[in-house]
Image: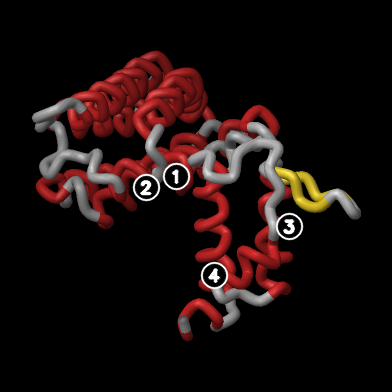
Amino acid sequence: MEEATREGPAQHRRLLDIIGRRIVEGELPPGSRLLTADVATELGASRSAMREVVRVLETIGMVDVRRRAGIEVLPPERWSPYAPELIDWQLDGSDRLRVLHELSQLRSAIEPLAARLAATKADPAQRTALVKAVLGMVEHGDRADEAPYMQHDIDFHTAVLRGSGNPYLAGLADVVTALLHGRTSHALMPKRADENALRLHQDVAAAITARDPAAAAAAMAGIVAEADDAVEAMAAPNGHH
């Protein structure tokens, strides 16, 4: 296990992912004790690496560290739902379709509003980033399940959220990024981009560029609805959206 004993950021992230997934999947259920010495031995990790992992899990609200009582796993309602690491683990878990649907519900509330605001608030650089992202999506549309398309899609939605001028909406860019990344990494993206989805992305960019809030919001609502439908279609038996 030479690889597992090498310290560094990659080692810490690997340990964090393993333990985070065990908590999400219920292998370490709420109320149970996280025995770091045992886990360190099992995974070939140092005590210091384990302490760092526990610190991150505590920040996310997944464990509670108490003197003498040890490290207790907390129930899901205590977790920070917007932590990108947690979203990654949930999308990697057995309940990913429910999580994707719930994140789509969140997007339906925030992204049309962000697009509406961006139509009047976005600065020239944000508008340029939006158009560039759409062009990239169109260019890579026949490989929508690959990383370059995903990155352009992430750039697009990030530009809209930041372009809203509202820091609380902009702060949700990491959540949308984790969702889009999860769709790609778990093969829930079609090989070829949906023509309607691409057109709607172009419509959002055009409306924001034209400073038309109502059109921007309507097109963005269409994007989120299409994305949720696409995930359900891909997830269904014999689903080939």
Check if mark 2's residue and mark 1's residue have beta carbons within 8 Å.
Answer: yes
C-alpha distance separating marks 3 and 1: 21 Å
Disc assigned to residue 178? 1
Q: Label 3 is placed on what type of residue? A: Arg
Query: Is the Cβ of the residue at disc 3 closer than 8 Å to that at disc 4?
Result: no
Amino acid beneath label 4 = Leu
> Image point 25% across, 50% down: which residue?
149
Callout 2 secondary element: helix
Asked if residue 236 lies left or right of residue 5, the reply is left
Q: Distance from label 2 to label 1 (Cα)?
A: 5 Å
Precedes in sequence: disc 2 or disc 3: 3
Residue 49 quadrant: bottom right
Please tell me which of labels 3 and 4 falls first in the chain.
4
- Of circles 3 and 1, the one toward us is 3
Residue occupying image coordinates x 56% and y 76%? 44
Q: Report which residue position mark 4 lands on.
A: 43
What is the spatial separation of the Cα atoms under label 3 and label 4, in whole angstroms?
18 Å
Whole-angstrom CA distance, mark 1 to mark 4, is 26 Å
Q: Mark 3 falls on what kind of element? A: helix
State the residue at coordinates (77%, 45%).
Answer: 64
Q: Where is mark 3, residue-wise?
A: 55
Residue corresponding to mark 2: 181
Is 110 left or right of 241, judged from the image as shown?
A: right
Pointer 2 or 4: first along the chain? 4
Q: Which mark is residue 150?
A: none
Of callouts 3 and 1, which one flags the residue occurring earlier in the amino acid sequence?
Answer: 3
Q: Nearer the viewer, mark 1 or mark 4?
A: 4
Gap between marks 2 and 4, in whole Å? Answer: 27 Å
Q: CA distance from mark 2 to mark 3?
A: 25 Å
Q: Residues within 10 Å of mark 1 (few under 14, many from 20)?
A: some
